[in-house]
Image: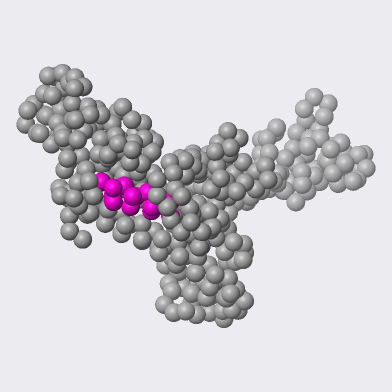
Amino acid sequence: MKSLQEAYDLFEKEYKKIHEYFVFSGLSFALVGTMQDQAKEKAKQTKIRVKKKESSFSKADHKIEEISVICEWVSLQEYSEREKLPLNSIEEQARAGVLGPTHEEGSELYVIWPKERQQDTDLPEFGKKMFEIKYSQSIETKAIIENSEQALSALGHYPDLAGTIDRSQQQLCPTCLLLYWTAFEGFVKDFIDTLYYLHPEQVLKKYGKNPMTLNAVFDGSHRFTDMDSLKRRVLEEVLAKYDRENISKLIEFVEDCYLSKGTDPFSTKFIYSGDKTEVNRGHLDQIRIIRNALIHDNGRLSEKEWKLIDLVPREGDNPVVQISEDSLGKMYYILKSIAYNLFDLTSKQYPEGKGKK
């Protein structure tokens, strides 16, 4: 079983990778933004080779652009109006066979429209029409990029390069917030597992008097053959008393079972852009609310939720949360600070589980 230090090191490594992705992506967008004119020029000069055999597409990429009638039966009156010719002249031509096949229905005579289709052999049955359907098929191919000129040329082929850069920059911050949160949430759950396996007695001190039936012990231990499974079963039953979907509640479990009374794992601080911020549980709850909105409702927050949010400024009456680089930076440090605080407080209290750095 890994130590608390190893559990934290895994989180720190993953968190750093995500932050590097954020910084590098931001720099890349900025660099491309300064080279738009060069990219457009290179697109005219340098041909890009693609791997045609590795094309990718789905049914969703097959789009109908236009449906038009190319041939149909119409009455002589309608034919006259469409061609802007006298009705009696049209009737004479139809009777003489000049307008191709005719069809008589009651007292009405029908002919094929338009004129250029009247001699076709594959005419529709009376009452039906022939259509022409124009569609497009989008296909993605992999460009073969072997040097900087080809890379610039590939960028220059974007029909709206400036807009693409802008949209990509807008997506970067919410995307990285979700990645930061995923790493943080994974760390908390992994840290609880590690802490519990190292010190299960602390959980039993608080919840040891909770009843467990012999059948539950029998099933949880896989017929008395697996103590690790029974150990996990006990933890799951205890965590069921908390809201496992709420990361703050899981941290509460650590607070209840592993920290000295009065120790607040949410209380910490950090410096961002020269300003000190005192962190509390409310900050973590805000990030959770924002994360859930991004995942489940395209970033839309209810009026009730907006009243709880001060980490991200609201743009007018817009219910959709807009995450700026500044807001993301603060949330990055909040999660990082709480993770370290959780590790620091518990490892000081249980130094034998800290491990070597």
Up/down of 163 relative to 292, above or below: below
Q: Return the x and y of residue 36 as percentages of the image width and height.
A: 60, 73
Q: Is residue 72 above or below residue 141?
A: above
Q: Could you tell me residue 165's position as x and y percent?
A: 57, 64
90 to the left or right of 34:
right
The answer to if 334 sits in the magenta stretch is: yes
Q: Find residue 219 and report its horizontal and vertical position in percent.
A: 14, 25
Give the residue at the far front of this rendering.
262
Could you tell me residue 27's position as x and y percent?
49, 69
Along the line of sight, the residue nearer the viewer: 59 or 289: 289
Magenta span: 333-346
- Residue at image position (44%, 79%) is 147
Quadrant in the rendering for residue 216: top left
**Would residue 138 be found to the left or right of residue 203 on screen?**
right
Looking at the image, residue 162 sits to the left or right of residue 98; the answer is left
At 17% from the left edge and 55% from the top edge, which residue is drawn? 355
Give the farthest residue toward the left.
225
Q: How is the image coloured?
A: one colour
Asked if residue 90 can be seen in this view, the reply is yes
Q: Main secondary structure of the magenta part?
A: helix
Residue 131 in sight in this render: no
Exactly how many numbered labels are in the figure? 0
Q: Is residue 39 left or right of residue 2?
A: right
Compared to 330, does 45 lie above or below? below
Locate the C terminus by quadrant.
bottom left
Q: Identify the residue shown where x is 56% and y is 45%.
A: 310
